[in-house]
Image: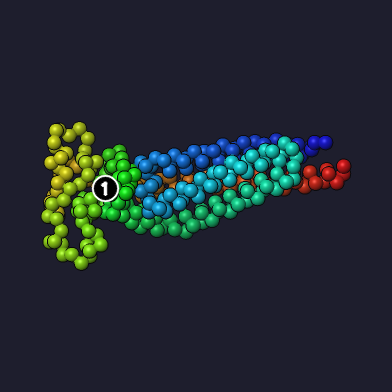
Amino acid sequence: MGLNGCCSCVKYLMVLINILFWLIGLTIVVTSVWMLTDPTFMLSMTQNYNHYHIALYVFLAIGILITLGAFFGCCGVCRESQCLLVSFFCVILIVMVAQIAAGAWAFHNKDKLDDIVRAAVKSSVQEEYGQSTMSSRTVTFDTLQKNLKWWGADGPGDWAISRFNKVDRTILWRSPVFSMNVFYNIPESCCKDNLKDNECELSRRLKFGGPLNNATYQQGCVDKLIEIIYENWVTIFAVTAAVILLELLSLTFALSLCCAVRNQHYKA
């Protein structure tokens, strides 16, 4: 015997909510896989390489959990199964707690965003760019420099003391300035578009402490990258808050249906 009255309305609402969860979960999974496989994704530059991948795997796990929870929820509603509804409740509760914890951490550390991003980008420029073991990082930075028309973290000086120019950064702090290369090279992606033949090649060699060449971009990327993140900060929090409210509503509905199913079994 099926549930009637108000419980019937709750069932239909639960189905709609779980369809939304299913779409949200699949979107998170697809986005996570895309970010893991696409080396040119912008957000990869805002964190340490290993931290970035750990965060993506956590993001992927949350997407899988939401998709699994939506499956439990739909099946639980259609079959009026307490077991499946409780499983849905537990999965969504875990996801919601993880989201609240992540949001609280992000809000608490938002003032440190500048330092975190600056340190990550400088590390990419000075330690990872051009290294054979970090080819994806090189591709990412080249793409960003070309598309967003910037170079380095704060400017060309970052390249002067980078591994890209064969500078051993493990002994840099003990080396006097005059012991470093008088001239240094910058990547081809620092050059502006539509240059004449060999103009980019000639502009890539700069003198340490010398004037900049007009054929290359002039602005470092950190300030621009932080600006882009701040522009989307409110949107991210708004979407997260909306999803959490939807999850709270679904938890309430799941408990209501569990109680209704139990009472129905007792009456039977």
Find residue 193 and report its horizontal and vertical position in percent: 22, 35
At x 66% / y 45%, what residue is drawn? Answer: 88
Amino acid carrying label 1: it is: Gly
Query: Which residue occupies the extreme bottom position in the image?
Result: 174
When asked about the image quadrant of residue 15, the answer is top right
Query: Which residue occupies the extreme front position in the image?
Result: 132
Find residue 218 and report its horizontal and vertical position in percent: 22, 45
Q: Quadrant of the N terminus?
A: top right
Query: Which residue occupies the extreme right position in the image?
Result: 268
Q: Is residue 122 above or below residue 265?
A: below
Find residue 153 and report its horizontal and vertical position in percent: 28, 51
User: Which structural element holds mark 1?
Assistant: loop
At x 82% / y 46%, what residue is drawn? Answer: 263
Find residue 65 and report its horizontal and vertical position in percent: 58, 45
At x 12% / y 55%, what residue is drawn? Answer: 182
Front residue (pair 151, 32)? 32
Q: Quadrant of the C terminus?
A: top right
Q: Is residue 268 left or right of residue 66?
A: right
When asked about the image quadrant of residue 71, the answer is top right
Q: Is residue 174 left or right of residue 106?
A: left
